[in-house]
Amino acid sequence: MNSIALPMISATGSLESYIQTTNRFPLLTQEQETEYARRLRDSDDIEAARHLVLSHLRLVVSIARGYVGYGLPQADLIQEGNIGLMKAVKRFDPERGVRLVSFAMHWIRAEIHEFVLRNWRLVKIATTKAQRKLFFNLRSMKQGLGTLGAKEVQEVARKLGVKPEEVVEMETRLGGQDMALEPAGDDEHEQYAPIAYLAADDAEPGTLLETAQTARLRSAGLEKALASLDARSRRIIEARWLTEKESLTLHDLAAEFKVSAERIRQIEAKALGKMKGLIATA
């Protein structure tokens, strides 16, 4: 698999150009996909693997768009997703009657998710609850604004009940990287039409949490939302998003609850969606 040549996003290249390139690779019919997968499985045919990978690069782009708000370059997310795609192609069994697009989504998301956990800016710049509150509220108040002036800093500090220098420091950290990603779609369905290769408007788990906290990060609302969850869901949310220590990975929690990492992700997504609705009405 390492010998497959993929289109690259260079430091000086255009991300849009890369996306256009991936969209030019044709989608495979189920018969073509099965044939290539069998050739790879039976003969270790690298050319067959190349066809399978290239035809699904647009899927990686679509999924990478879903990881919005983490301050990580979209190009890096796509490259990590491509690693997950290649792992999926290597493990794909064409005899199970499942299309590669459905099988690959877990591997792509898992690879991107682990990359986000290792590099998420919030982990680095907002390590306490107070800093997280300032992080989300400041980001919400700065929507559409440039650098805050002295009077704006004073006003924000007054509204948030923090020192002006804390606002200035957090704003400086927030400005360290671009945030240009867009939300992608839900992945609860087992079968996907080609339209699923394009970004949808449904929120990803990380987007749901950020939207909820950015809009209404209130202690009472958050406690109410957490109290509405069952013990397992609450444990997952607290360990993944509300701990001041290092967040647990999907695989850590999968081992704890003796289920798959994908099952943990599904529980997490459902819990975040429920919390979003409760916090929004708090």
Image (cartoon, rainbow, N blue to C red):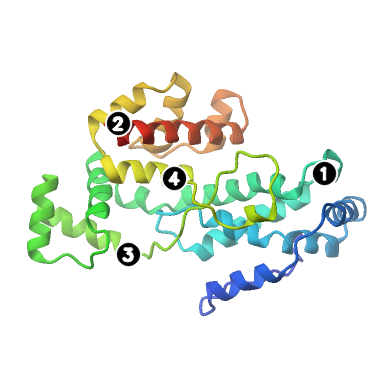
Q: Is residue 143 found left or right of 208 in the rendered image?
A: left
The residue under label 3 is 176
Q: Which residue is mark 1?
A: 93
Say if mark 2 contacts mark 3, CB within 8 Å. no
In the picture, which quadrant includes the C terminus? top left
Instruction: Name the residue: 27% across, 59% down.
Output: 143
Amino acid type, callout 4: Gly
Q: Earlier in the sequence, mark 4 or mark 2?
A: 4
Q: Secondary structure at mark 2?
A: helix
The span from disc 4 to disc 2 (Cα, nearest Å) is 16 Å
Q: Earlier in the sequence, mark 2 or mark 1?
A: 1
Q: Residues within 10 Å of mark 1 (few under 14, many from 20)?
A: some
Mark 1 is on which residue type? Answer: Asp
Q: Is residue 128 visible?
A: no
- Residue designated by label 2: 222
Point out the tag, 4 or 1, that comes first from the N-terminus.
Answer: 1
Q: Quadrant of residue 197?
A: bottom right
How packed is label 4: few (under 14 Cα within 10 Å), some, or many (20 or more)? many
Q: Where is 102 relative to 165, above or below? A: above
Above or below — where is 71 with respect to 253? below
Instruction: Indicate which disc residue 39 carries.
Output: none
The span from disc 4 to disc 1 (Cα, nearest Å) is 30 Å
Q: Is there CB contact under 8 Å for labels 4 and 2?
A: no
Cα–Cα span, label 2 and label 3: 28 Å
**Toward which corner of the image does residue 23 lie, by quadrant?**
bottom right
Q: Residues within 10 Å of mark 2 (few under 14, many from 20)?
A: many
- Horizontal placement of 221 versus 3: left or right? left
In the image, is residue 64 above or below residue 262?
below
Give the labeled residue for mark 4: 206
The image quadrant where one finds the N terminus is bottom right
